[in-house]
Image (cartoon, coloured by chain):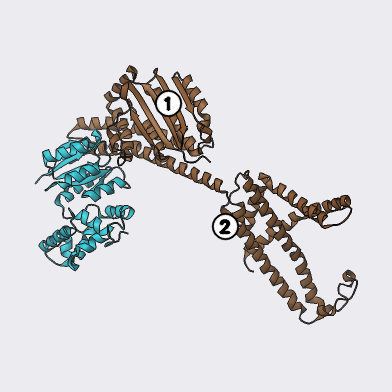
Chain colours: A brown, B cyan
C-alpha cells in the first residue's frame, strides 16, 4: 500500500482502461450495425459483435511496432522482471499471438481497475459524508432521497475500507500483469537462441583477440623487457651486446605495434554496426577474390541458406581466410574451392598447387630471423591450443610463412566443434574443414 | 659453489637476454640452451644443470611435458617455469607435474637471479603469494584425499602450513623453536608422506586438498 510500485502500476492499469475505450466504442458501433442488419438483438448478434471486436484487438496487437510500444510501456511502468525484456522483432505468429494475449489482459484488467478507480473514491466520499449530510445529498443525481442504509453510522468506515480494498486490488492486478509480462512480452525461444548465439560469437571473438594479444604483443614485450634488462647490466662490459639488444628491442617493439594495430583494427571492426558477412555474401567474396587476380574454381553443393547463422558467419570467415592465404602464398596458381552441405555437416575444401613461387615465399620467410620468430610463435600457439587432441598436427606441414591465417581458421573451426586437416600431398596444398551444422532452424 | 643453469625458450632473443643477465653473476653460470622440449630433455642429460628455466608454450614438446620428463629422473634438476603472463593455465600444469616455481619474463634482473638462487637452495618456496593465487584460480578442491591418506603428525602438519606461507627452513625453526636439523627432518617426512618431489609440490597438494585455504 505504501510502495511506489503499486501506484506506478496503477497508472499502467488506468492506461489499459483508456486504451479499452476505443474498442468499447467500436463494439457499440458494430453492435448497432449488426442489430440493424439482423433487425433483432439476439445471441447471434451479440456473438458477432464480440468476435468482431476481439478480431480488431488482435489485429492491432499483431503489428510488430505495437508490440514494441507495449514492451516499452510495460518495462517503464511495471518494471520488476520486465526491466530486462527488450522488444524483439515480434514478426513470428507466436509472438503476435502473445502480443494479443498481453493486450487483452492489459485492457480487461486495466478496464476493470479503471472503472473501480472512478467509482470507489466517489462512493467513499459519499459514504463518508452521508450520515452527516442528511437525505438530500445527491438528490439532484438520484432524483430521490438517499436510501436509509447509507445514512447508517458505519458507512464512513465502509467507505475507508473500500478505498483500502481498492488499493490492494490494484496492487494484486499490477503484480499479476508484472508476472504475466515476461511470458507474453519476453523473447521467444528463437530470439533466446539467437541472443545466445550472439553471445557465444562475441565470446569467441574476445578469446581470439586475447590470444592474438598474448601471442604477438605479449611475446614481443617479453623480449623487449629481457633484452633491455640484459643490455642495462652489461652496458659497460659488453657494448656490442648492448647494441645488438637495442636493435632487437627496436624491431620487436615495431612488430608489436603492427600487431597491436591489427588487433585494435579488429576491435574497431567489432564495435562497428556493420553486420557480419555470412555465406549469403559468398558470391561477393568470390568475385572480389577473382578480381584480385586469382584463378578460382568454386562450386557449392547443397543449400547454404539453411545453415545456422553462426555457422554461416564463421564459415564465411574460414573461406575468406583460406582464399587470402592462397592469394598471399600461392599467387598465380589455380585454386579450387568446394563447399558441400550434407547430412549434418558443412564441408569446405580448398586446394592449390604448391607452386615454385610459394616455395620462394617460404625460403624468404625463413631467411628473415625476426619474421621467423613471429610467425613461428603464432603458428605454434594454435598447436598448443589443441595439443591434447591434435598432437599429431604438431608436425603437420605449415603453409609457406603461414601462421595467423591457419590459427585463425583453426580457432573458428574449434568454436563450431568441427575439425580441420591440412596436407601437402601430391604437390597440392589442401585445407579441409568439416563442421557439424546440427538441425537447421 | 656455482649454480649451473639451463635455459629453455623457443625465442632466441629471450635466451640471449637471460644468459647475459645470469652470466653477469659470479655464482651463476648458464651451461646450455634449448629451443624446445625435446632439446631440453637432451640438454639436461648432457649438462646435468642445477636449475632449468623452462618456457611453457613451445612447439613440439611443450614445457609441461618436458618438465614431467626432466623431473622423473633421479637427482633431477629443479625446474622454474618462465612465462609471459601470470594468469596462464599452462603454468599451473607445469607446477602440478613437478616444476618448483614460476618466474615472469618481465621480472627484474635481481628477482630472476634471486629466484634461481632460492630454488637451487631448495629450502624455501618461490613466490608463495603467486603460487597461492594460482592454486586459488585453478586447482582448489582436487585430490581431497591425498593429504588425509598421508597421515601427517601434528608437527608435520604445522610445518606444512608454514611451508605454504613461504617460510624458509631457518624461519620455521625459529617459529617452532626447534633446531634447523629437526625442521629438515620434518620437511623430509612431509615430502615423503605426500610423495612430493619438493616443497612446491607439497604446498600445492596442501592447497588442493583444502588443508591450507588460499585467500
Q: Which residue is mark 2?
A: A81
Q: Is residue A244 above or below residue A69?
A: above
Mark identifier at residue A323 = 1
Let me know if marks 1 and 2 both belong to one chain: yes
Residue B210 figure quarter: bottom left
Counting from the top left corner in percent of width and height, residue B83 is at 27, 43
Q: Is residue A405 above or below residue A96?
A: above
First of labels 1, 2 by sequence position? 2
Counting from the top left corner in percent of width and height, residue A394 is at 28, 34
Chain letter for the residue marked with disc 2 in the picture: A
Q: Is residue A434 visible?
A: yes
Q: Is residue B13 above or below residue B189?
A: above
Counting from the top left corner in percent of width and height, residue B155 is at 18, 67
Q: Nearer the viewer, residue A299 or A176?
A: A299
Label 2 residue SS: helix
- The answer for how far apart the CA atoms under marks 1 and 2 are is 48 Å
Q: Is residue A152 left or right of residue B168?
A: right
Residue A360 figure quarter: top left
Mark identifier at residue A23 = none
Residue at 31 percent of width and 20 percent of height: A359
Chain letter for the residue marked with disc 1 in the picture: A
Counting from the top left corner in percent of width and height, residue A160 is at 72, 74
Label 1 residue SS: helix
Q: Nearer the viewer, residue A241 or A380?
A: A380
Q: Which of label 1 and label 2 is nearer to you?
A: 1
Q: Is residue A337 left or right of residue B178?
A: right
Amino acid at each position: 500500500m505504501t510502495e511506489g510500485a503499486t501506484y506506478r502500476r496503477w497508472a499502467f492499469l488506468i492506461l489499459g482502461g483508456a486504451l479499452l475505450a476505443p474498442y468499447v466504442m467500436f463494439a457499440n458501433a458494430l453492435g448497432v450495425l449488426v442489430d440493424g442488419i439482423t433487425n433483432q438483438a439476439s445471441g447471434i448478434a451479440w456473438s458477432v459483435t464480440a468476435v468482431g471486436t476481439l478480431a480488431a484487438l488482435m489485429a492491432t496487437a499483431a503489428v510488430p511496432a505495437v508490440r514494441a510500444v507495449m514492451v516499452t510501456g510495460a518495462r517503464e511502468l511495471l518494471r520488476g522482471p520486465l526491466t530486462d525484456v527488450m522488444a524483439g522483432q515480434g514478426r513470428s505468429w507466436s509472438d503476435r499471438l502473445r502480443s494479443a494475449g498481453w493486450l487483452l489482459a492489459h485492457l480487461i484488467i486495466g478496464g476493470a481497475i479503471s472503472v473501480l478507480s472512478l467509482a470507489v473514491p466517489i462512493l467513499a466520499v459519499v459514504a463518508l459524508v452521508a450520515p452527516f449530510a442528511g437525505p438530500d445529498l445527491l438528490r439532484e443525481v438520484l432524483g430521490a432521497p438517499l436510501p436509509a442504509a447509507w445514512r447508517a453510522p458505519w458507512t464512513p468506515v465502509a467507505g475507508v475500507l473500500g478505498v483500502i480494498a481498492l488499493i490492494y486490488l490494484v496492487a494484486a492486478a499490477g503484480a499479476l500483469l508484472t508476472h504475466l509480462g515476461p511470458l507474453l512480452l519476453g523473447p521467444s525461444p528463437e530470439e533466446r537462441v539467437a541472443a545466445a548465439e550472439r553471445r557465444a560469437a562475441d565470446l569467441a571473438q574476445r578469446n581470439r583477440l586475447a590470444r592474438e594479444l598474448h601471442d604477438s604483443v605479449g611475446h614481443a614485450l617479453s623480449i623487449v623487457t629481457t633484452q633491455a634488462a640484459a643490455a642495462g647490466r652489461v652496458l659497460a662490459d659488453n657494448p656490442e651486446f648492448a647494441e645488438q639488444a637495442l636493435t632487437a628491442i627496436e624491431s620487436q617493439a615495431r612488430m608489436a605495434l603492427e600487431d597491436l594495430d591489427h588487433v585494435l583494427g579488429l576491435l574497431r571492426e567489432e564495435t562497428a554496426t556493420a553486420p557480419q558477412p555470412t555465406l549469403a555474401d559468398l558470391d561477393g567474396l568470390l568475385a572480389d577474390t577473382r578480381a584480385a587476380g586469382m584463378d578460382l574454381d568454386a562450386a557449392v553443393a547443397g543449400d547454404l541458406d539453411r545453415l545456422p547463422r553462426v555457422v554461416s558467419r564463421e564459415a564465411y570467415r574460414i573461406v575468406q581466410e583460406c582464399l587470402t592465404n592462397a592469394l598471399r602464398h600461392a599467387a598465380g596458381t589455380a585454386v579450387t574451392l568446394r563447399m558441400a552441405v550434407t547430412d549434418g555437416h558443412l564441408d569446405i575444401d580448398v586446394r592449390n598447387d604448391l607452386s615454385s613461387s610459394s616455395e620462394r615465399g617460404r625460403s624468404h620467410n625463413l631467411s628473415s630471423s625476426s619474421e621467423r620468430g613471429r610467425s613461428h610463435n603464432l603458428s605454434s600457439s594454435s598447436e598448443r591450443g589443441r595439443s591434447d587432441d591434435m598432437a599429431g598436427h604438431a608436425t603437420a606441414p605449415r603453409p609457406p610463412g603461414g601462421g595467423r591465417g591457419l590459427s585463425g581458421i583453426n580457432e573458428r573451426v574449434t568454436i563450431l566443434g568441427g575439425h580441420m586437416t591440412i596436407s601437402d600431398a601430391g604437390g597440392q596444398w589442401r585445407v579441409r574443414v568439416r563442421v557439424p551444422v546440427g538441425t537447421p532452424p | 659453489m656455482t649454480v649451473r643453469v639451463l635455459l629453455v625458450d623457443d625465442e632466441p632473443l629471450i635466451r640471449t637476454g637471460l644468459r647475459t643477465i645470469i652470466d653477469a653473476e659470479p655464482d651463476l653460470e648458464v651451461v646450455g640452451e634449448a629451443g624446445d622440449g625435446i632439446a631440453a630433455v637432451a640438454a639436461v642429460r648432457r649438462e646435468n644443470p642445477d636449475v632449468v628455466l623452462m618456457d611453457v608454450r613451445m612447439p613440439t614438446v611443450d614445457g609441461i611435458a618436458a618438465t614431467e620428463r626432466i623431473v622423473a629422473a633421479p637427482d633431477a634438476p629443479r625446474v622454474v617455469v618462465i612465462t609471459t603472463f601470470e594468469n596462464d593455465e599452462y603454468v599451473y600444469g607445469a607446477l602440478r607435474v613437478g616444476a618448483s616455481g614460476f618466474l615472469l619474463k618481465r621480472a627484474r634482473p635481481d628477482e630472476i637471479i634471486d629466484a634461481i638462487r632460492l630454488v637451487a637452495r631448495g629450502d624455501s618456496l618461490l613466490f608463495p603469494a603467486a603460487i597461492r593465487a594460482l592454486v586459488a584460480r585453478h586447482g582448489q578442491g582436487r585430490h581431497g584425499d591425498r593429504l588425509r591418506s598421508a597421515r601427517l603428525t601434528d608437527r608435520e602438519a604445522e610445518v606444512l602450513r608454514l611451508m605454504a606461507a613461504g617460510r624458509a627452513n631457518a624461519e620455521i625453526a625459529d617459529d617452532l623453536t626447534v633446531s634447523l636439523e629437526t625442521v629438515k627432518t620434518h620437511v623430509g617426512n612431509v615430502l615423503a608422506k605426500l610423495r612430493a618431489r619438493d616443497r612446491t609440490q607439497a604446498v600445492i597438494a596442501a592447497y588442493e586438498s583444502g588443508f591450507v585455504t588460499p585467500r
